[in-house]
Image (spheres, rainbow, N blue to C red):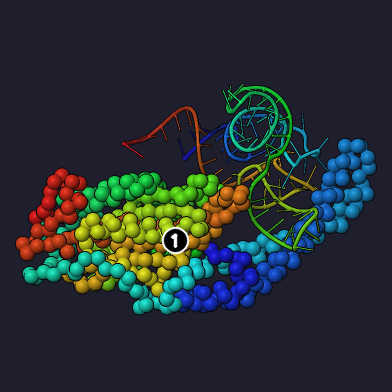
Amino acid sequence: MIDEKWILTDPEAVKEALKKREYDIDFTEYLELKELRSSLLQKIEDVRAKRNKLSKSIGQLKREKKDTSELFNEIDTIKNAIDEDELTLKDIETQVEEFLYKIPNIPDDDLLAGGKELNEVISVNKEKPSFDFKIKDHVDLATSLKIIDYERAAKMSGKGTWMYTNLGARLEWALLNFFIDEHLKDGYEFMLLPHILNYESGLTAGQFPKFKDEVFWLEGEDKFILPTAETALINIHRNEILKNEELPRKYFAYTPCYRKEAGSYRSEERGMIRGYQFNKVEMVQYTKPEDSDKAFDELMAKAEGLMKQLGLHYQVSKLAAGDVSFAMARTFDIEVWLPSIGIYKEVSSVSNSRAFQARRGKIRYRKEDGTVDFCHTLNGSGLATSRLLPAILEQNQQADGSVLVPKVLVPYLGGITVLK
RNA sequence: GGAGAAAUACCCAAGCCUGGCUGAAGGGACUGGUCUUGAAAACCAGCAGGCGAGCAAUCGCGCGGGGGUUCGAAUCCCUCUUUCUCCGCCA
């Protein structure tokens, strides 16, 4: 949720800022509603104050066993005066809230105005690998190495899924364990979370109301299966006031991520590039507002550090305002090179939501001076393993169809250095 | 899934039957002070926080959430959520 005070004081500026993400908004109706709310509230509170005073007097007279009929006459006249106004007020507040929940976050000043096509590659790691043989794609590699089974997974589940078998499962698990160890080293708190969440959680994270159709809902339960661990991690401190010295708070979690991805299939995304379920380790930080830029850099450095240790060729993209997701003010993507399709695919997305999610979830902290303010929340994948595994297979493949295991993973694979 | 009990401010806890003087007793923690070489102890004092309206004085809402009854609700009624106990069922 964006800052209402800003809309009220300078709606034009907010409108301009949102234009950067190609989002056009009209505050006319909203401002009218706020106006109406204000006058209505004034009226209601006046009557309530009067009523409270009279009721108090009645209490006092009763205690003194005096006659109260005069006061009752007086109170009769205001008794129902605001009934209707109270209903109207509630209605207005619902409308205002619904309106606010649908507005995306304000992009940071330094982002380019416009969509995806303006994303900027700001750094590249390693040379693009070259091969002096005909390369295979990850589906062929994984299938011939017998580490992923697509057909049997389809049999039990349907399209858009796969199963890791034997060394495949171990490789996936090695990645996860490697990431977990790295995050622990950096003092992040390890969380295993519920995967079934309530509506409020999705609302706070910014998934809802806009993207309610992109997650799997449990029938008759008003609950959904998380599309990313972020949705849960962001709700740990919902409706809390954190102590000044508790910040920054750094968490990470491993969860599978479940997404509908309805109609998003592209032929280039065969195999495990896009599925209904994939694995990811996610990092989240709660910070003071003044520290969130630093935290962003830290998350970026951590995600990149993991990629570097894996020895993969990747690029970092700074997303243009229009490509930054709904709840975020800025996002950098780490995109890994997939030789078979000749493109870079996102394996990590590091974002700063600033106070956007905190406002939705009333995530606050007490400042040193005793006043209360919203935290900033940030998240970053660290990393999405299900896209990493194909990249490792493709980038590390050899002429004979075997694959070199990244050095850092060897200890996690019981000393295995080559998949063959 | 069935049956009961509970949810009060940072923590513990009174009040709820018998609605009004409860912006919520009492303790602990915390903060400040007295005392002390310093500390502890003892004693004294302070201590809902938050949200909303207003330039302000001040006012409104707040006793798990939502709704209702009433002139008036922490207190009565309904509902939801969560926790605990027992039974059933299981990993």
How crowded is the residue under tag 1: few (<14 C-alpha within 10 Å), some, or many (20+)? some
The image quarter containing residue A399 is bottom left
Q: Residue at x 45, y 49 (%)?
A: A249
Image: A382 above or below A4? above
Q: Residue at x 41, y 60 (%)?
A: A296
Report the residue marked by disc 1.
A293
Residue A180 position, x and y percent, is 30, 48
Residue A158 can be seen, yes or no: no
Between B84 and A280, the one lying in front of the other is A280
Image: A27 above or below A47? below
| Subunit of label 1 | A
Q: Residue at x 32, y 61 (%)?
A: A348
- On the picture, is A279 further left or further right than A82? left
Residue A259 position, x and y percent, is 35, 61
Residue A41 position, x and y percent, is 73, 62
The image quarter containing residue A91 is bottom right
Residue B20 position, x and y percent, is 80, 39
Q: How many marks?
A: 1
Q: Where does the C terminus of chain A fall, quadrant-wise? A: bottom left
Q: Residue at x 64, y 63 (%)?
A: A93
User: The disc labelled 1 sits on which kind of residue?
Assistant: Asp
- On the picture, is A16 further left or further right than A371? left
- On the picture, is A92 further left or further right than A83? left
Secondary structure beneath dot 1 equals helix
Between A394 and B89, the one lying in front of the other is A394
The image quarter containing residue A44 is bottom right
Residue A252 can be seen, yes or no: yes
- On the picture, is A279 further left or further right than A297? left
